[in-house]
């Protein structure tokens, strides 16, 4: 109904409207624009059926005045999603990392890694808000690549998006392999690779999950898993103290090799680092006007919870087995002489502990809800670059299946995968999680949009140091593995 040069949109009432638009509101739009808004709401529903992560036509959904997407995720859901993303596969290696660092440096480095990840995530959040201010609400960034485009140009956007997707796909591949390893703890009749294939066949249904609301319903498992991790590793540690001889549980206060500290820190940083999924989660949060504060709360609370859990479980694992704790703490949870794979094939392995079965079950359950969150972010990023993937159900589904099978194939069949992953992780992890947030913060500070002071400068220096030294160590390990295989 046209009133002067305005249009009464009272009749447009569906779930795409927000509280600021009710039956008494008149749109400051012409009739054609109002029709576009209605079409956007209808298109948003159709996109949900296709499974696209997009927000309707031209991003119009939710608040019509601002154009900002109105998501459905609460602050609590965002916090649990972030915790679930962080509490993942690397938790099994943390007792070994503390053992390599010593009683004093190990817990302190875990705490520093958490603070580093938290600060970098907050820089990403701040950069997203600054770019939204520059481009307007309808141009709000969907990924860190959009931020890089504003700061450094379109070519940098392509590079950042490609590296982010590569990093997340590699991460999912590792998750599936870890699921297979933990399933293998339950059986000796199948190899770890066979267990991984079973995990993939069971988990392939994850590509059909279309809604972040559905994914968020399982995110509480990550919070529960963090308590189970601490309880199971803690109880196993005390069992090790009671059953293993004192000489097999030696420990140290400081690291034996200072040269390994940067690589150890990179592994610890990898166990946090949710900055790559933060833009997608932020876009899907409800109440846009409260998103900046809500995201800060979610980031800080989730990092505090995860850091506390990590320090507890890593210290308990080191206390139980000392310098002899396995690289995967699960492989330490057996009676003497040890677990299969950790002892000579000529010896009969010891009985597996109940705490090991509990831990492996918790890891599998947690990763099966972590993988969908990471995949959702991958799918959203890829879809944002292709209109075909947003409009075609078959093309969208084919892309999702290809991503999952591709990530697992890389993990299973690429030679020296662990060593190559260490190289990729050190370079991409530090580059995407530390250097990129600092870089865009510096670029935005030149326009007066954000501040770049000594905290950002210190973070940048730390990232460069870890990247150079850690990458050098990772390349040396890869070269040693190739040499040993050829010998």
Image (cartoon, rainbow, N blue to C red):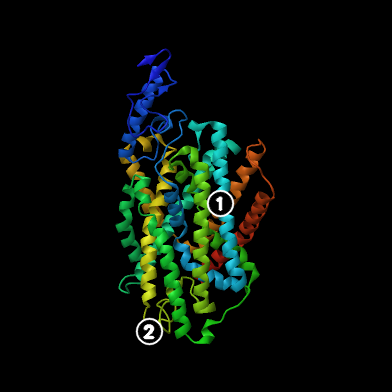
Which is more N-terminal, label 2 or label 1?
2
Q: Are marks 1 and 2 in contact (CB under 8 Å)?
A: no
Q: Is residue 24 visible?
A: yes
From what the image shows, is residue 33 above or below residue 365? above
Residue positioned 40% across, 29% down in the render: 21
Identify the secondary structure beneath mark 1.
Answer: helix
Q: Mark 2, residues whose alpha carbon is within 10 Å: few (<14), some, or many (≥20)? A: few
* Extreme residue in the right direction: 454
Residue 87 x %, y %: 45, 60
Which image quadrant for residue 199?
bottom left
From what the image shows, is residue 379 above or below residue 367? above
Say which residue label 2 marks: 348
From what the image shows, is residue 434 above or below residue 31? below
In the image, taking residue 188 as reference, residue 413 lies left or right, namely right
Identify the secondary structure beneath mark 2.
Answer: loop
In the image, taking residue 41 as reference, residue 113 lies left or right, namely right
Depth check, mark 1 against mark 2: the one in front is 1
Say which residue label 1 marks: 433
Quadrant holding the N terminus: top left
Which of these two is toward me, 278 or 70? 70
Residue 109 x %, y %: 60, 64
CA–CA distance in space, label 1 to label 2: 44 Å
Which of these two is toward me, 278 or 260? 278
Residue 70 x %, y %: 42, 37
């Amino acid at each position: 109904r046209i009133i002067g040069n305005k249009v009464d949109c009272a009749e447009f009432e569906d779930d795409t409207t927000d509280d600021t638009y009710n039956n008494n509101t008149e749109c400051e739009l012409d009739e054609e624009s109002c029709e576009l808004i209605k079409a956007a709401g209808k298109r948003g529903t159709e996109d949900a059926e296709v499974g696209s992560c997009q927000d309707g036509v031209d991003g119009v959904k939710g608040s019509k005045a601002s154009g900002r997407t109105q998501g459905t995720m609460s602050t609590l859901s965002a916090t649990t999603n972030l915790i679930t993303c962080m509490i993942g596969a690397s938790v099994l290696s943390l007792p070994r990392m503390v053992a390599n660092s010593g009683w004093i440096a190990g817990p302190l480095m875990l705490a520093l890694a958490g603070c580093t990840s938290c600060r970098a995530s907050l820089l990403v959040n701040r950069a997203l808000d600054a770019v939204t201010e520059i481009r307007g609400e309808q141009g709000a960034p969907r990924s860190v690549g959009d931020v890089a485009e504003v700061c450094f140009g379109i070519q940098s956007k392509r590079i950042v998006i490609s590296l982010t997707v590569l990093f997340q796909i590699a991460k999912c591949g590792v998750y599936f392999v870890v699921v297979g390893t933990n399933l293998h703890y339950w059986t000796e009749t199948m190899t770890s690779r066979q267990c991984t294939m079973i995990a993939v066949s069971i988990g392939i249904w994850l590509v059909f999950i279309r809604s972040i609301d559905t994914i968020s319903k399982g995110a509480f498992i990550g919070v529960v898993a963090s308590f189970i991790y601490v309880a199971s590793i803690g109880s196993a540690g005390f069992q090790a103290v009671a059953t293993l001889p004192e000489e097999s549980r030696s420990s140290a206060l400081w690291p034996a090799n200072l040269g390994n500290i940067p690589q150890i820190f990179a592994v610890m940083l990898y166990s946090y680092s949710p900055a790559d999924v933060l833009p997608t989660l932020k876009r899907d949060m409800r109440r846009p006007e409260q998103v900046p504060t809500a995201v800060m709360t979610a980031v800080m609370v989730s990092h505090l919870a995860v850091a506390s859990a990590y320090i507890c479980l890593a210290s308990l694992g080191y206390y139980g087995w000392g310098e002899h704790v396995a690289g995967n703490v699960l492989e330490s949870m057996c009676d003497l002489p040890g677990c299969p794979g950790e002892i000579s094939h000529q010896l009969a392995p010891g009985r597996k502990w109940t705490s090991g079965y509990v831990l492996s079950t918790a890891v599998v359950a947690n990763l099966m809800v972590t993988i969908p969150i990471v995949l959702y972010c991958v799918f959203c990023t890829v879809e944002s670059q292709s209109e075909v993937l947003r409009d075609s159900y078959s093309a969208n589904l084919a892309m999702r299946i290809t991503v999952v099978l591709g990530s697992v194939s890389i993990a299973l069949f690429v030679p020296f995968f662990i060593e190559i992953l260490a190289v990729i992780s050190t370079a991409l992890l530090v580059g995407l999680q530390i250097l990129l947030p600092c870089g865009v913060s510096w670029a935005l500070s030149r326009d007066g949009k954000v501040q770049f002071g000594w905290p950002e400068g210190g973070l940048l220096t730390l990232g460069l140091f870890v990247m150079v030294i850690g990458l050098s160590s990772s390349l040396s390990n890869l070269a040693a593995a190739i040499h040993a295989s050829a010998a």
